[in-house]
Image (spheres, coloured by chain):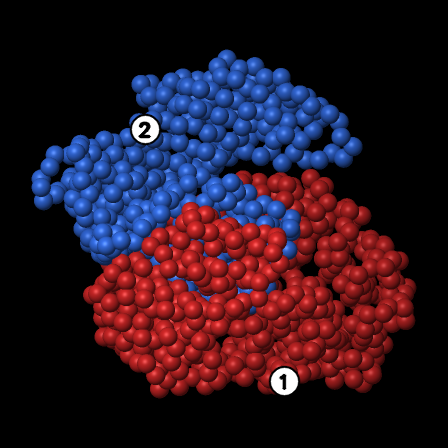
Chain colours: A red, B blue
Amino acid sequence: MSIRGPRKGENYELSVDLNSEYRDKRKDAIKRVIASMTVGKDVSGLFPDVLKNMQTEDLEQKKLVYLYLMNYAKTQPELVILAVNTFVKDTEDPNPLVRALAIRTMGCLRAEKIIDYLCDPLQRCLKDDNPYVRKTAALCVAKLYDLKPELVIDNGFLEQLHEMVSDSNPMVVANTVAALTDIHNTAIAAQISPSSSDPAIFNITSTILNKLLIALNECSEWGRVAILNALSRYVAQDEKESEHISERVVPQFQHINGSVVLAAMKVVMIHIRGVRREELVKQLIRKMAPPLVTLLSSPPEVQWVALRNINLLLQKRSDLLSNEMRVFFCKYNDPLYVKIEKLDIMVRLASDNNVDALLSELKEYASEVDVDFVRKSIKAIGQTAVKIDAAAERCVNVLLELIDTRVSYVVQEAVVVMKDIFRKYPSTYEGVIPTLCANLEELDEPEAKASLIWIIGEYADKIDNADELLGIFVDTYIEESYQVQLQTLTAVVKLFLKKPDSSQGIVQRVLNTATKDCDSPDVRDRAYIYWRLLSTDPAAAKAVVLAHRPPISIPRTTVSPALLEELLGEISNLASVYHKPPETFIGQGRVSADSVQRKGSDTSDDRFSAQKALQTVVAGQQAENLLDFDDNMTVEGQPSGLAATQVLPSTPAAANLLSGTSTNPLDDLVSIFGGASVSNGMSGNAFGTNGLGGLSSPTTLAPSSGFNNLVASSPAPPQQQQQEDLLGLF
Amino acid sequence: MISAFFIFNQKGEVLISRLYRTDFKRSIADVFRIQVVSNSDVRSPIITLGSTSFFHVRVNNLYVVAVTKTNANAALVFEFCYRFISIAKAYFGKIDEESVKNNFVVIYELIDEINDFGYPQNSEIDTLKSYITTESVVSTAIAAEESSKITSQATGATSWRRGDVKYKKNEAFVDVVETVNLSMSAKGTILRAEVDGHIQMRAYLSGSPECKFGLNDKLVIDKNERGAGGDAVELDDCRFHQCVRLNEFDSSRTISFVPPDGEFELMRYRSTSNVKLPLRIISTVNEIGTTQVSYVITIKANFNNKLSATSVVLRIPTPLNTTNVDCKVASGKAKYVPAENVVVWKIPRIQGGQECTFNATADLTSTTVRQVWARPPIDVDFQVLMFTASGLIVRFLKVFEKSNYHSIKWVRYLTKASGSYQIRF
């Protein structure tokens, strides 16, 4: 009946053993088949032989055969039919474990032919006396829906599930809720426009709500997570209901399982929006702090998830953990990802009271071995200085001590950080400039060089040998990276405007080199603009180049307010770990512009939704560039630059959105420069964007098409960030 | 939702592979091997490629991996991985490549049972052990009846306990285990001192006993409920096994529960106030020129002299270019371990109030590039029996059961540190 392999080799031996007359030998052979299957050998040829062993009293053997069936049912659908009888018989077995096992496995056999035989047993099992069978059957409905939705709807399984929400057994309720949610999500993903009339949509009504709240206290830990997830989707009718839900969920903060704690936080963070009683809000927030800190004693991976979420929660409620900074101090043996997250949170929690402790910690970290961590620690010192005015001087002193170590990467990072301090506190710490300049030769990274050049340009009138120092960079102009070239250019122009007499020569030289020998259009265009400004109207040049710029500050949030609200509703999910909307990394990584727009129209704030949409599109593009291994591995080597440009025509909405958001000051600016450079016959887009990438934008972008870069850098959420970028432009 | 679950060995070979949903092929395992196992610079426990996210946990050279295509609950996925690890430990005594290979059949049964269609199911070890055993279960009429009991237990309100437990001698053992996390600065100020407490219980009690558990009289569980006096024991937070009625705890602060049979973790707590540090370390480490480092380290036992600290191990870091260390110790043994760049000083026992001193000089070779020594902290491991750093004590454990039997309760205390008691110098 089936095609037999050659009469030798491993598979042949297995086949002989599977047909052995001794039970032990047969069972052993099945185990070996499973072992081969695990390591990826093809044992599908043994299907009929394995199938013969299905009818057995031995539960373990049955499970093994089922495991094999689940794996190969898809490739051998016509043979699976042979197993159907046994399955159906098993669903009527007196032993509930066998009944549950049979229905569980049948749902996992992804063969069309067997599905039709599934409905009757499933009908029976949903009404089984035994709760264990019922809870398994509930999930089986979700499996069936995944495969053939019409069958579920036609057989009335959905109505049955809705009835089962009122089951007396809390575990059955939990699995029913999980199944309904799963079906709900599948239905939404499959539909173009979700309508609330679709039976698959799982609307949580207030009757369901009460049942869920009762089951919550009684079911298993995983069931609690499923129920809490459902609760987070419930839309409270009034304030009283919001309060009620929050109060009922709070005891779950004490659960030993971290995922229950985080799921409970999610529910509270969502329903707290409806609570107006200030006192209750305070009380709820206060109760959140200790469990969050306790999560830090979990295993490092759970800790990391907790830290990422704490980071989000702090952006919403900065007072949440105000007295707890010490618990975020890094342990020497924490994994790097935990340390870096802790650093970020420490800076968020920095205040006048704890800044001394923080600084001595950061200084300690700056002497550790991991280069990344050391750099981040130094960056954190800079952020602290920018954040807390009173501590700036202490921060500068710590930085000077670090520069004294003369460790190359420490010095370079410290120089970069000093630039930010100068931007926040202009003309305050000029005393340290000589120390910085003394380390000029040690700098070899573009960002550090550019930072130092910016400082020299900004204080050109106070540094006696500024022309000499800048001269060093002008001499090697062509070899420097674009970032350094742009900064040198601007710094020399600043020098010229401040000390016109002594620097005529150097400014000529740099403008000449930049316009004639430089292959970056950005550098060349900027040089042209400066040149024309200087030659036509020096006063205007002064007004533009030496204009007063607002001091920088640390943005309180790293994501836009609208996105923050969305992410708070995703607490403990992947989205909250990545701080990105889920569309950017699920659904094949392809975000259609339509769906983005639809999503955007839901939120009330147009400006933010537009920004968010852009961000989503960009991230989606990036995700697409990653290897797509759904079916085979051939796409692996796809060049990312190409992939990114290919996406553009398919997402015209990105362009529409971009031109539509005129509230975004950046776009105006870009269009100004676009216009300006067109008159020069240059590529306008490229000019505008790479300028942005110049000094301050920390993201390094691959030099692909200009338009692409534009999209990538524009959605930086907070207004403040854009102002910073503007500074870098000049 | 977990779409697939894998176990890899260190070489990236698949030991266990189970697909819960059909959005992947088995070849997804290769992607993980390429991206994580053979990549030396993995800096995150979650890796997302395209729309596929890999969650991994490393344990004894194994990778326990869960894969998903959805916006899954990350905390849940990791908790699930760790739950699997603890189940495997309970079943096989340990989890490593050998035990996974030898028991793969049971592992398949287990992961089939604790997860269905990507949703974690009942994973209470005690319950699982009742129906997933290493011996084969034969499905007979008697077994069917037995199974009914098991299944109703697995789904019941007390899913963690069988109803028909019987013991001749009813006993309950309570172990209070506190782990002290300390970081102390070079100047001797405490940067962070925290007690991570676990109350481990082994209950061998018949029937369905109703237990009530009482801690110190002066116990402050919520910092904002202060007012119990200065010497009160304050817990910043506590968490309970799922058998404890959280609602009752929330309203009246009583800890009442029907315990699972056998061993379980009743409670976990955290305390940061009034932490009594059992060992005090005073260190003077000087770099003499570029060729020598001198150490004088004193360890002092800061507790009642009837008690003693055992298995005390200090790991004292040395610079990377150390050639030889000359150690002088009055008690214990000290040895330079070049592979780890530390001197390991082992002291089998220190009586309360006692003091021990360590003197050493490390000789350094001259190096071409002068590197600054990062000075990692001194790490101290120890155990002190019958001592709690938080001051927590168990006042009572009351057991109520229908048959009103007499039960014996035992309480033990242990304070320890392993890898988390760090002193900078």
Please give the residue where the numbered disc 2 appears in the rendered image. B387
Q: Residue at x 80, y 48 (%)?
A: A441
Tag of residue A652: 1
Three-letter amino acid code at the position of disc 2 = Phe
* Spot occupied by residue B3 in the image (x, y as percentages of width and height): 48, 63
Q: Residue at x 49, y 72 (%)?
A: A77
Residue furthest to the top in view is B330
Q: Is residue A215 above or below residue A180?
A: above
Q: Residues within 10 Å of mark 2 (few under 14, many from 20)?
A: many
Evaluate if marks 1 and 2 touch, with contact meaning CB atoms under 8 Å apart: no
Tag of residue A522: none
> Would residue A50 be seen by someone viewing this image from the given angle?
yes
Displayed quadrant of residue A658: bottom right
Q: Residue at x 43, y 21 (%)?
A: B300
The secondary structure type at the circle numbered 1 is helix
* Spot occupied by residue A153 in the image (x, y as percentages of width and height): 35, 82
> Would residue A391 be seen by someone viewing this image from the given angle?
no
Q: Chain of mark 2?
A: B
